[in-house]
Structures are given as structure tokens and as C-alpha cells.
Amino acid sequence: MEVLLFIAIILTASVLQTSTGFGFSILATPFLLLLFSVSDAIQINLVLSLIISSALITKIRNDIDFDILKRLIIGSIAGMPIGIAVFVLVDMQKLKLGISLVILLLTVLLILSLRIRRTNGRDFLFGGLSGSLTTSIGMPGPPLLLYFSGTETLKEKLRGTTLAFYLFIYSVSLVLQIIFTGTHTTVWVSSAMAIPIVLLGLYLGQRLFHRIDQRTFRYVTYAILLFTGLYLLFDNLS
């Protein structure tokens, strides 16, 4: 039963990540925690997310906005130490509650047609927010998804730029995880077993990406954001 659950989690998360550029850590982490310890679940998530981004990087290279990517990376470098400080100093349950309420509020505003004008300064800001959330709660995606949805970025550019960004942010996060918490054989054996499932998810996700239009893509991003906000909210309340 646990094996079937593991396959379902990885396949669904891989399809979502490949077709949207988001969603693997958001969807996989809560369910992987049912099967693994916190540290192992996070590291499996990081390893498999890196595999997906690495496998797609040559296919999506032409969709990457390298100017925005550079600013996101610089912002995230500034944000990661802040996230570590927040992780050490702030009560984690209160932090997750605050983040969940902000995500839900902004998602509702986006659904009600709130739009954000993209600027260089905001690229740095949201890169910083993504970096700080990576090192505090392990979720870099929500700030970028809110930002790119608010600026109505084309789905090709959104997916390409975020997957390239994940190559950087997840690599750094995995190194930090191993340095500060160590690693276990379970992480690498489970990740190796998941590779065929991830490859199937890559194939299905690529096909899905070419079949969905910009409007449907936007609705999917709203659903991911709502799921993230509600998960953090109910995880805090429970």
C-alpha cells in the first residue's frame, strides 16, 4: 500500500511540476511526510525536483528570461539568510499561519483580477521572498507563482524561468540540508526508485503543457496556490 501511495505521489507531482513549472514540493511534501521523516521527505523532494529541472532545462532554454532569472537568483541569495534567521527565531506554527493567510488573501485578489506591474525591483523582492521561504519552510514556489500570475506572464516564460531558478535554489537547499541535518540511505534509495516514475511524469507533463491554453494554465496556478494556503492553514490548526 505504501509503495502504491509513493508512486501516486511522485507521478502526480512530477506531471504538475513539468506542465506548470510549479507544484512538486507543494503537492509532494505533505504526502511524503506520511511515509518518511521530515528530513528525508524534504531531501527526497529536493533531489527529485532537481532531476526534473535538469531533465527539462535544454528543452525550455529558449523560454527562460535570463534577465529576470538573474535578478531572482540575486534576490534569493539575500533572502536565504533571512529565512534561516526566521526559522531559528520565529515560532514555526505562527509563521505558517501567517504565510497561509497571506497566500489565500492574495490568491483571492488575483482571482478578482488584481494585477501587478513587473519591475526590476520587484524581481529582486520576490526572489528574496522565495529564498527566505526556501530556508524557512522549504517552499520557494508560492511567491513566484503569485508574482508571475499577477503580472500575467506567458505560461512558457513562467515555466522556463521558474524551472531554471529551481536548479539554483534547490541545489543550494540540498547542500544546506545535508550539511546541517545529514542524510540517510533511505533518501537516495527512494529517490533512485522514483526516477522511472519521474520520467513518466515528465512525458505526461510535457504532453499536458502543450494541450492547455493560457486561461486554463492560470486556473491551474490559482488551484495550486489555494491548495498551498489551505494546507499550511490546516497543518497549523491541527
Image (cartoon, rainbow, N blue to C red):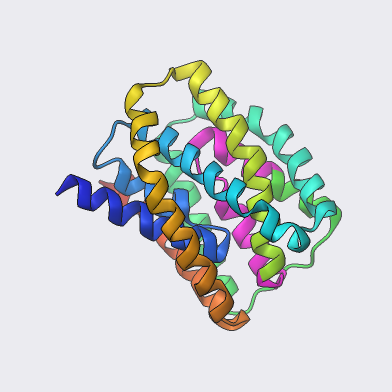
Q: Does the magenta stretch include residue 150?
A: yes
Q: Which residue lies furthest to the left in this view?
A: 1
Quarter-wise, where is residue 175 in the image?
top right
Q: Is residue 235 in view? A: yes
Residue 235 placed where, x, y %?
32, 47
Residue drawn at (65%, 27%) of the image: 81
Residue 79 placed where, x, y %?
68, 35
Residue 64 placed where, x, y %?
76, 58
Residue 57 placed where, x, y %?
67, 52
Q: Is residue 117 magenta?
A: no
Q: Which of 198 and 128 is in front in this view?
A: 198
Residue drawn at (30%, 40%) of the image: 33
- Most prominent secondary structure in the magenta stretch? helix
Q: Nearer the viewer, residue 126 or 217?
A: 217
Q: In this view, does 207 lie to the left or right of 36?
A: right
Q: In this view, does 108 lie to the left or right of 233?
A: right
Tell me which segment is drawn in magenta. Answer: 128-155
Q: Is residue 83 in view? A: no
Q: Looking at the image, how many numbered discs can be counted on the residues?
A: 0
**Residue 144 sits above or below residue 195 on the image:** below
Q: Nearer the viewer, residue 111 or 40?
A: 40
Residue drawn at (49%, 17%) of the image: 180
